[in-house]
Amino acid sequence: MNDTILWVIFGLTFLVVLFLDLFVFFKKKNEISIHKALLLSSVWISLAVLYGLLILFSKGNNTFVEYITAYLVEWSLSVDNLFVFLIIFSFFSIPKNFQHEVLFWGVVGAIVLRGLFIFVGVVALNSFEWLFVVFGLFLIYTGVMLIFKQEKEEDIENKFIYRMAKKFFNFTSSFEDGKFFVFKHKKLLFTPLFLCLLVIEFTDIVFATDSIPAVLGVSTNLLVIYTSNIFAVMGLRSMYFALSGVMNLFAYLKYGLSVILSFIGIKMVIKELFNITISSYVSLSVVLGILIVSILLSIFIPPKHENEEG
């Protein structure tokens, strides 16, 4: 089975489920229940697994392992997005029954932007192999800095996209029944939902500067990177409404991500400078092992908060 057929299968599957998501499962603007969120997320995860098996039988073990590793890396890095989404929705006071639509259209933007970033990244790495060292060092730096990153409130009002939107667009004070824009007195007005969507899209671009180099360190196969990336993002964002109440399960994830990013960075550097190749199987084992340990530590040894101490 050639790549063209695999791309067509992915595209058709993705469009069908996306259509069902918006126009069948969540046609009404109601609050998304945990049951529905888990159901839709399980659909995306199942599709990711089935597509992985398709890659296994058509492309072989090594490509399959790269696909699974890239999926896990993107999934783990995207968990951070959920924390920020919670803050953004809270800042704009977005009612829960409107949050799904914002996330849905945010995903549509992510599909396009991530596709562009991945394509440019693959072309650049295939054209200039020394970029492996640059990307690798960047990931090592990011991994180390992640350990020392201080937890602080997201400053929405100082985000560039927020300030520019406020400056150039006119906004309504109400949500206008979940619309992104309305016409009043022959004038186009945007709602707080649209502004929230812009901030989420901008945030996704910022997060992609970490996640895209990371998956490029796993594989430079465009099919593997893009499909695993989108399946991971869709599965996790669908799970948002279920995970929003149990974020404590990922309390130590940032330390795990630090190790994962540093590991992938080292892998890229030593391959280019010393011709030492770390196999896809070792990479998968390391990434999966770190994720499991991080989550288990978060569950069984939860961090103490200041108000819980003495």
Image (cartoon, rainbow, N blue to C red):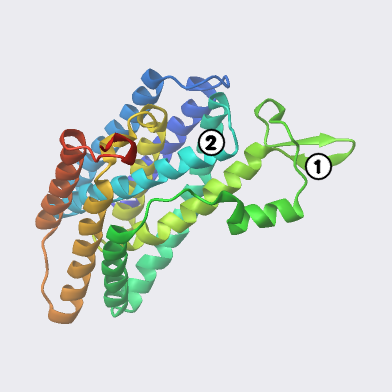
Q: Quadrant of the C terminus?
A: top left
Tags 1 and 2 touching, CB below 8 Å: no
In the rendered picture of this protein, how many numbered marks are placed on residues?
Answer: 2
Q: Earlier in the sequence, mark 1 or mark 2?
A: 2
- The image shows residue 213 at horizontal and vertical percentages of 33, 63
Q: Which mark is residue 53?
A: none
Furthest-right residue in this view: 185
Above or below for 270 versus 310? below
Mark 1 and mark 2: Cα distance apart in space: 26 Å
What amino acid type is highlighted by mark number 2?
Answer: Ser
Q: In what element is the residue under mark 2?
A: helix
Query: What's the residue at 38%, 45% (across, down)?
Result: 230
User: How many neighbours does mark 2 have within 10 angstroms: few (below 14), some (14-19), or many (20 or more)?
Assistant: few
Is residue 71 visible to the viewer in this orientation of the structure?
Answer: no
Query: Residue 137 versus residue 43: which sits nearer the camera?
Result: 137
Q: Nearer the viewer, mark 1 or mark 2?
A: 2
* Mark 1, residue position: 188
- Residue in the picture at 56% in, 50% down: 156
Residue at figure coordinates x 29%, y 46% from the top left = 76
- Specify the label residue 90 is tagged with: 2
